């Protein structure tokens, strides 16, 4: 336990000082060749950005919607902090909508395989919203992640889940803040329009790194 605590403090120090490359190396973080190859297909739902690997190097090409009766996310929208304040995500009760061009980094530890993509995407996006003040339970997010892993065939393992429960909150409070504007909405608030797919989406200034 002492070793895990010291490790968490060292990683936290690196996050605060900006040496994320050292963290990726220490955690043996990488993106599998299968994930990189699949991203080259015009039908892929995500883009792989090799110049950012293995950090925030994955980006959605179209909106993704989850409907989960086990979660109550409330009603809110998450906006990009810079004008024109594009909607990045929104919650509508048990529905979570992640709009296109959202950037994430796959698994925090180890290799990201094709089975890890969807579980890590929803978990990262909800942690991002939680960090910026969205009314979500971290416990509910972690439970949803475990269920997503089971459904997609990702090997989460008991140790990985309990490590997430122990240290996820600490790591989520570190790093860059004010990267998302949470705006409360109501059931009567219309959802933001979904942008059309662009498989050849260029790397532009609206691509977004949450941490």
Image (cartoon, rainbow, N blue to C red):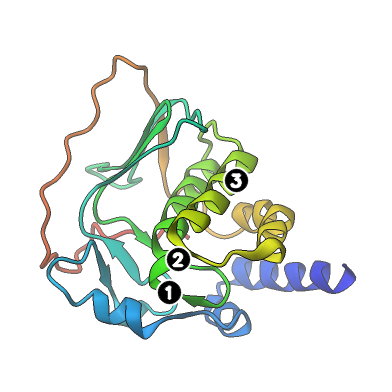
Find residue 211 and report its horizontal and vertical position in percent.
48, 60
Residue 172 lies in quadrant: bottom right
Q: Which of 46 and 146 is in front in this view?
A: 146
Q: Name the residue under label 2.
A: 116
User: Can residue 16 be seen by looking at this rendering?
Assistant: yes
CB atoms of marks 3 and 1 within 8 Å: no
CB atoms of marks 1 and 2 within 8 Å: yes
The numbered mark at residue 113 is: 1
Label 3 sits on a secondary structure element that is helix
Q: Which of 106 and 10 is in front in this view?
A: 106
Find residue 55 and report its horizontal and vertical position in percent.
44, 74
Find residue 3 and report its horizontal and vertical position in percent.
84, 74
User: Can residue 105 be seen by looking at this rendering?
Assistant: no
Rounded to the nearest angstrom, the CA distance separating label 1 from label 2 is 5 Å
Q: Name the residue under label 3.
A: 143
Quadrant occupied by the N terminus:
bottom right
Residue 40 position (above or below residue 209): below
Label 2 sits on a secondary structure element that is helix
The reply, left or right, for residue 207 in relation to residue 67 is left
Residue pictured at 73% horizontal, 73% vertical: 10
Residue pictured at 52% horizontal, 32% vertical: 70
């Amino acid at each position: 336990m002492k070793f895990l605590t010291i490790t968490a403090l060292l990683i936290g120090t690196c996050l605060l000082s900006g040496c994320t490359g050292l963290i990726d190396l220490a955690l043996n973080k990488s993106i599998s060749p299968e994930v990189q190859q699949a991203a080259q297909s015009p039908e892929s739902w995500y883009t792989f950005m090799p110049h950012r690997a293995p950090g925030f190097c994955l980006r959605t090409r179209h909106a993704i919607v989850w409907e989960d009766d086990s979660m109550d996310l409330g009603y809110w929208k998450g906006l990009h902090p810079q004008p024109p304040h594009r909607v990045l995500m929104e919650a509508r009760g048990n529905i979570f909508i992640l709009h296109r061009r959202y950037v994430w980094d796959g698994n925090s530890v180890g290799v990201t395989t094709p089975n890890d993509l969807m579980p890590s995407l929803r978990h990262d996006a909800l942690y991002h919203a939680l960090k910026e003040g969205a009314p979500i339970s971290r416990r509910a997010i972690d439970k949803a992640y475990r269920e997503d892993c089971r459904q997609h065939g990702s090997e989460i393992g008991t140790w990985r889940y309990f490590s997430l429960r122990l240290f996820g909150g600490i790591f989520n409070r570190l790093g860059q803040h004010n990267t998302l504007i949470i705006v409360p909405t109501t059931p009567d608030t219309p959802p933001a329009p979904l942008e059309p797919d662009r498989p050849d989406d260029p790397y532009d200034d609206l691509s977004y790194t949450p941490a």
